[in-house]
Amino acid sequence: MLTNKIPRIPDSEITPENLYMDRRRFIQLASGLSVATAVSGIAEATSSRFDTNEKQTPYKDVTSYNNFYEFGIDKSDPARTAKNLKTQPWTISVEGLVKRPQVYALEDLLKGLTIEDRIYRMRCVEGWSMVIPWQGFQFGELIRRLEPTSQAKFVEFQTPLAPDQFPEQRRRVLDWPYVEGLRLDEAMNPLTILAVGLYGKPLPNQNGAPVRLVTPWKYGFKGIKSIAKIRFVDRQPVTAWMKQAPNEYGFYANVNPAVDHPRWSQATERRIGEFFKRKTLPFNGYADHVASMYACMDLRKDF
Ligand SMILES: Nc1nc2c(c(=O)[nH]1)N[C@H]1C(S)=C(S)[C@@H](COP(=O)(O)O)O[C@H]1N2
Ligand SMILES: [Mo]
């Protein structure tokens, strides 16, 4: 119905960006529908109250400048070396203080959840940033279904430990597997999504296929990729980066221009594709949505 009103673009000029703009979607994963089909499904245009309207980082940069240490430490490594990661079938083990612990097939776990567009600013602790249009669902929606018990205070995530799939796990770059965590209220915050797509296409492996965490007010390393385990716990998890360098990477990892990384400043950032640096905003510009969760905390101490 839309198609004949849109001027024809030669196939050679159709980029993922064009495709994405033509069909923003808002759909529910029906039974039997794969994540890939859902993400590329067409439905009515919607935009989220959380979207930024800043210029989006080109698809090519989003998918070729990556951190995914299981596939190498250079930004260009994952796009080359993550190709062989087998993401289908995929299971997620839900464990711990929860009413429905079980190993779920990804499609079963996501069935009926609403996938929506979220255009978020993303800020890496290394000082660069991007604007990425994600497709994902509110993690809180899934948590409510899984029914954590009243003792659950934190959520721990893990990427698989599988050196045959993740070549750099043969070396001790980090103490594998990659582990991340959120406090339960952070996990339930409407900004927190589990992403299954970007630019209207299923997540490329280098961006964390088939499902990864996105918390735009925190530094990028919180956004654990290729999630295979979600565990509800009563104690603050020890994340892979806290193990690696506890004085450099705290549990909270909120974007905070006032707290320097011990080896460099966090006051400014360089948006990929831009020349001039810009000022980094507290909570990456999402303070209205998240600052109240930290009202009683000293974020210099709990960095
Ligand atoms: N499993 C896993 N997840 C990870 C990482 C990693 O090395 N392994 N790197 C993190 C870091 S430091 C950043 S900045 C983001 C980068 O996500 P992107 O490549 O999709 O932009 O992924 C995060 N998630
Ligand atoms: Mo990062």
Image (tube, rainbow, N blue to C red):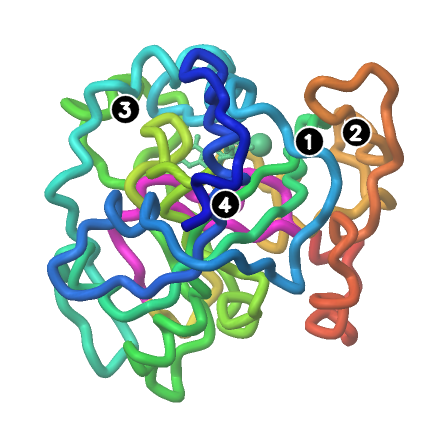
Q: Amino acid at mark 1?
A: Ser
Q: Which residue is mark 1?
A: 129
What stretch of residues is rendered in magenta?
Answer: 212-231
Which of the 4 image quarters holds residue 137?
bottom left
Residue behind label 3 places its C-beta within 8 angstroms of ligand 1: no
Q: Which residue is mark 4?
A: 134
Q: Are marks 1 and 2 in contact (CB under 8 Å)?
A: yes
User: Magenta span has 225?
Assistant: yes
Residue drawn at the location 23% of the way across and 83% of the way down: 99
In the displayed structure, does residue 122 sit left or right of residue 231? right
In the displayed structure, does residue 242 sit left or right of residue 122? left
Residue drawn at the location 75% of the way across and 53% of the way down: 283
User: Magenta span has 269?
Assistant: no
Residue 275 image point, x, y percent: 82, 15
Q: Which residue is mark 3?
A: 169
Q: At numbered mark 3, what does the secondary structure look like: helix, strand or loop? A: helix
Residue behind label 1 places its C-beta within 8 angstroms of ligand 1: no
Q: At numbered mark 4, what does the secondary structure look like: helix, strand or loop? A: strand
Q: Residues within 10 Å of mark 3 (few under 14, many from 20)?
A: many
Q: Amino acid at mark 4?
A: Trp
Q: Nearer the viewer, mark 3 or mark 2?
A: 2
Q: Residues within 10 Å of mark 4 (few under 14, many from 20)?
A: many
Residue 235 image point, x, y percent: 44, 69
Q: Which residue is mark 2?
A: 269
108 up-or-down from 117: above or below: below
Q: At numbered mark 2, what does the secondary structure look like: helix, strand or loop? A: strand
Nearer the N terminus, badge 3 or badge 2?
Answer: 3
Nearer the N terminus, badge 3 or badge 4?
Answer: 4
